[in-house]
Structure formats: C-alpha cells, structure tokens
Image: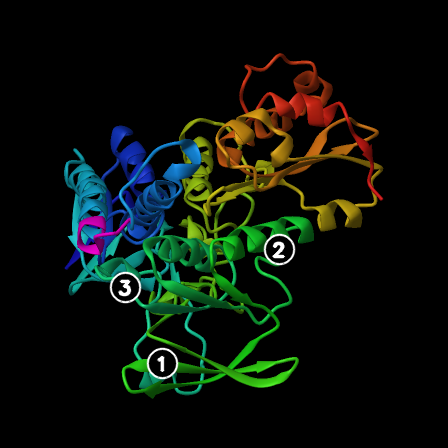
Amino acid sequence: MTQKFDAIVIGTGQSGPSLADRMDDEGMKVAVIERNLFGGTCVNVGCVPTKTLVASARVAHMARRGSEFGVNVASPVTVDMELVKARKDAIVQSSNSGVTGWMKGLDHGTVFEGHGRFEGPNTVGVNGETLEADKIFVNVGARASVPPIPGLDEVDYFTNSNMMDVDFLPPHLVIIGGSYIALEFAQMYRRFGSEVTVIERGPRVIAREDEDISLAIRDILESEGVTVRCDTGVDRLSKSGGDIVVELTTSDGADRVTGSHLLIAVGRQPNTDDLGLDAAGVTIDGRGFIAVDDQLQTNVPGIWAIGDCNGLAAFTHTSYNDFEIVAANLFDNDPRRVSDRIPCYGLFVDPPLGRVGMTEDQVRASGRNVLVGTRLMENVGRAKERSETAGLIKIHVDADTKEILGAAILGIGGDEVVHCLLDVMYAKAPYTVIQRAVHIHPTVSELIPTVLGDLEPLE
C-alpha cells in the first residue's frame, strides 16, 4: 500500500525539521523519516555535546590557573568524568527531546522511525511501507570517515560519535588526524587530564587555514602539553597488552607511539551509500555527496539535498541556511542561492578561531590588489586583562573596491567578534564603515577599526 504525501523529509538534522515545520505551516501533508536520533549530528554527537564538554574542560583549565588571578583553588584540581558526561547527556537529551516533540507535534505531519530508501524518483520505502510525494528532501547528514589502516580491525577505537559515551579519563589518548574535530578533542582531553598525542600526516595541522593561524593554534595546544606530530604517517595499529601501538613513518624513519585509547578524526563522509539514490536516478560525486544546483535541487526534478550530504559545507549554520534557501524559493518568491553565502565557521579550541570569507592563499590566487591588517592578541586590552593573550587578528581588504575579502580572528571572543566583519561583508559596504565606527571599550571588537586603520599591501 502506498501512502501519498505532499512532501517527504528524510533525516532530521539542522535543516530538515525547520523545512518540515514550514511546509506544515503551509498546510502541506508531510512525512518525516528518521532512522536514529532526532536532531542529527549537531544535537546528538556534534556541536551540542562537544561544546558542552569544551566548557567543562575550560573550567578545569581556569581552575588550575587560579593562582595567576590571585584566586586560591584547592590543588590538585580533579575532574569527575562521570559528572562531566552526565551534564553533557542532560543538555543533549533536552535538545533531542525538543526536536523529537517538535516533529511528532506537526499538525499535518507523520513521523516514520526507520531507514528510508528511495524506490523511485518520487517514492521512498520505510518499515515495509511505500511513501509517495512530488517533493522529497534529503537531509541525511554525514559520519566519521574511517581509513583502511592495517590492524584497525584488531583494536578498539573511537570516532567523534562513540567518544560521547566516554565517562572515564583515558590515560593517553592518541588522535589520528589534525583538523577541527581532532584539535578540539585534543585540547579538551588534555585539560581533563589525559596525555594526548595528535598525529597528522600533512606538514601542519588544519592545513586549509593560513600558515600563521595554523602555527599559532599548534603553539596554543603544545603550550598546554598536547604532543603534535606532523609529517607523520600511520603504518599499522596493534595491541600490546591493554594498550594500542601506533606504528609511524616520519622523515627520520620508523617510529611508534603507544597509547591507552585511540580516536580516529580524519574527516567525514555522507550517509548516502544506503539511500537507494540509484533507484531515483540522483547523481552523486566521487565521494558520495549528492550533486545539487545553486538552489539545492538535484538532477532529478522534485528532489533536493540539504545539509551535510550535499558536500557544500559541513556546518550546522550552513545546513540551516540550506533550509532558508529552499523555503524562500518554494514559498516566498525569493530566489535565494547558495552562491550568495559567504563562507564562515569557527574552530572551538580555546581561544577560538572565527573565520570568514577568503583565506590568504585564496586572496593571493585571486590576483586582486590586496591590503592586510594584523594585530597580535597580546596587544589587545581585553586579552591582557583576562590573561588570554594567545592568537591574532588578520583582515584582508580589496584595495580597489575597499570591500573586506576575508578575516581570521584567533583569540578570546574571536568566534563572536568576527561577525561584525561578516555583516559588513554581506552588506557589501566598504571597510571604512567599520573602521570609522565607535566600538565599546574595553572589548576585542574595539580593535577591529584599529586593525583596519593600519592596512598595508599584502607582500
């Protein structure tokens, strides 16, 4: 028997529920399919839990630094990982329950808890039933990539997902990977009290960032006791008693690291391999991401891909923007496009990195006449008052149009401060608008006009 709907939403990450809700408000009959946890990665194993853990780790870190501020804290500072996890679980459960209740409470919606698979371009099978709709939206997200390392099947390991189940302190956590997820976990667990080793096969961590930003982040982590090994390949994994041995290749030859626990954090892959996309005729790229146009439609009329599975940007905020683009085109006669979006994201080590627009490599490759302004956080009053002086501010400007091309703010409040630049970029206003603005003292934001007032040609 086939059940007919106006629309089907497969997956309940950041964009799917909002779109289902909007269609429900429009009076459409909507089917919502979720095979696992409502809320997707962000709510359950991504942003919400990890940033909750980051917060606990920061408290431990600052408690150990109490004497720097004239505050006597009992020594040594200890961390109760069971309570840390319990706090995280409570916050996650609240968010998960909120999304679950939201979807199950739709006036014109029906929730199917099971694995949805395409049976044709306008039909989806779930739990032995066939659902049909003229509009189908795929919001199935992504998961951790696990590389084919020899010996991996012989050892226990974590990904970012099952790392959320940890309620103990790993004596020595070895992390394979040196990008965003890896570095957040590295600092977090070092602050909890673990010995931490990061192994990155490339020449530097977070290689997509500017070299000075990458090196500054490495310095921050190493200053807290994280061991970072770049230009290091992983050859094989094996057990040695209760430990895990990681055999390495370096420029100096073979080496090894022995740790108590292992985290694999080398990237993400889309959850599209068991979705029946071939039955619908939907095109995917070589990595499994669903190909979409500038308004998130696939090559098959009536099928859209939103969120991480389309490969355009694996962030919660871009997933939500995908919903906004689709809804604007469907209901508001507003032809919004993905290409209107300015890249922006954060790296939530402490201090955090806020990044918007083009990187320095991209700016150089553009062939523009570019100006750059920089300032070390050690010269920012707010940073000195908080004794958090690591990092820097860097802003690139087009000398001819006076538009801001990109910026990186690594430092206290950097993930918030960067938005004042992002908003000016969306307005396509000249940098002089913010340069001449009067900002509140003492803040980090007050230094943005100063940096923009000291622009020099990019060498």
Residue 60 can be seen in this image: yes
Q: Residue at x 33, y 86 (%)?
A: 239
Q: Quadrant of the N terminus?
A: bottom left
Write down the residue under mark 3: 162
Q: Which of the two marks, 1 or 3, is nearer to us in this view?
A: 1
Label 2: element kind: loop
Determine contact: label 2, label 1, CB under 8 Å: no
| 204 within the magenta span | no
Sort mark 1 into few (<14), some (14-19) or many (20+) by Cα contacts within 10 Å: many
Label 3: element kind: helix
Q: Give the vertical position of 174 relative to 306 (above or below).
A: below
Q: Nearer the viewer, residue 197 or 132?
A: 197
> Is 13 situated left or right of 431 in this image?
left
| 82 within the magenta span | yes
Write down the residue under mark 2: 208
Sort mark 2 into few (<14), some (14-19) or many (20+) by Cα contacts within 10 Å: few
The x and y percentages for residue 416 are: 49, 31
Residue 11 can be seen in this image: no
> Is 440 situated left or right of 321 in this image?
right
Amino acid type, label 3: Asn
> Is 305 situated left or right of 446 in this image?
left
Q: Nearer the viewer, residue 344 or 75?
A: 75
Q: Which of the two marks, 2 or 1, is nearer to us in this view?
A: 1
> Tag on residue 244?
1
Residue 417 is drawn in which quadrant? top right
The x and y percentages for residue 78 are: 26, 51
The x and y percentages for residue 289 are: 48, 61
Real-space CA distance between mark 2 and mark 1, rounded to the nearest whole angstrom: 30 Å
Label 1: element kind: strand
Q: What residue span does the magenta drawing correspond to?
A: 77-84
Q: Residue at x 62, y 62 (%)?
A: 204
